[in-house]
Amino acid sequence: MKLCFCICCFLIAVSSKGQETFQFKQIACDFPEIKECTYDKLLGEKLSIKLEQFNRVYTKEVNCGPPNYISSIEIQKPDLYYSIQKLTKHYRKCKKKDILSQEKIEKEMVEIIDKSILIFNQQTDSVEQELRQANNSEDIIGVFERIIIE
């Protein structure tokens, strides 16, 4: 019995080590004003606007100059950016298959997107490293749940 208890305590200690929280300071942040955006029928208007705000914060148009004068999009903090893209696909599938309600999808995604925007100008290396190792949507959501903004 004591051996079983010791093994359980050890497993809890090992698993809790990987569950560190990421603490960030509440810094004044301007959420871009969106006057018009592409409306996603599956995700709804509110979430479409939030995603557009996210895209404006995390991407930057870069003009390449002569000879082609073609502009391209530079993605800043790609691990965070692509994690949100994966979650967007995940929530679209959940909505299509009626796994989650529109309200639950909006609540979860808005919270995650707001956190992403609020931490954009801060040191996010540890979060990005965790997101790089995340294998699925649940892992990505777990990383965002551990982000605490004070």
Image: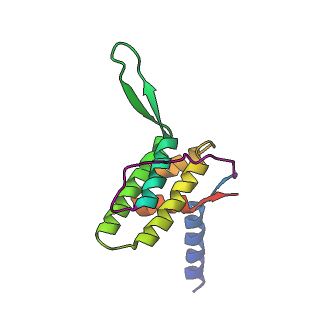
Q: Position of residue 129 (x, y in %)?
A: 51, 47
User: Exactly how many numbered labels are in the figure?
Assistant: 0
Q: Is residue 7 above or below residue 92?
A: below
Residue drawn at x 68%, y 48% as measured from the top left: 28
Q: Is residue 125 located in the magenta-colored stretch of the structure?
A: no
The quadrant where residue 71 appears:
top left
Highlighted magenta segment, given as a residue range: 26-44
Q: Is residue 43 located in the magenta-colored stretch of the structure?
A: yes
Which quadrant is the C terminus positioned in? bottom right
Q: Can residue 85 be seen in this view?
A: yes
Q: Which of 145 and 65 is in front in this view?
A: 65
In the displayed orientation, state which residue is furthest to the front. 35
Q: In this view, does 112 lie above or below 60?
A: below
Q: Is residue 133 visible?
A: no
Please give left or right for residue 94 compared with residue 76 in the image. Answer: left
Which quadrant is the N terminus positioned in? bottom right
In the displayed orientation, state which residue is furthest to the top. 67
Q: Is residue 74 above or below residue 116?
A: above
Magenta span dominant secondary structure: loop
Q: Where is residue 22 in the image (x, y as percent from the top left)?
A: 62, 55
In the displayed orientation, state which residue is furthest to the left. 97
Q: Where is residue 5 in the image (x, y as percent from the top left)?
A: 59, 81
Residue drawn at x 45%, y 48% as measured from the top left: 52
Please give left or right for residue 143 compared with residue 63 in the image. Answer: right
In the displayed orientation, state which residue is furthest to the bottom. 1
- Rendered image coloring scheme: rainbow
Residue drawn at x 51%, y 60% as measured from the top left: 110
Q: Position of residue 83 (x, y in %)?
A: 44, 51
Q: Is residue 9 above or below residue 54?
A: below
Residue drawn at x 42%, y 55% as measured from the top left: 48
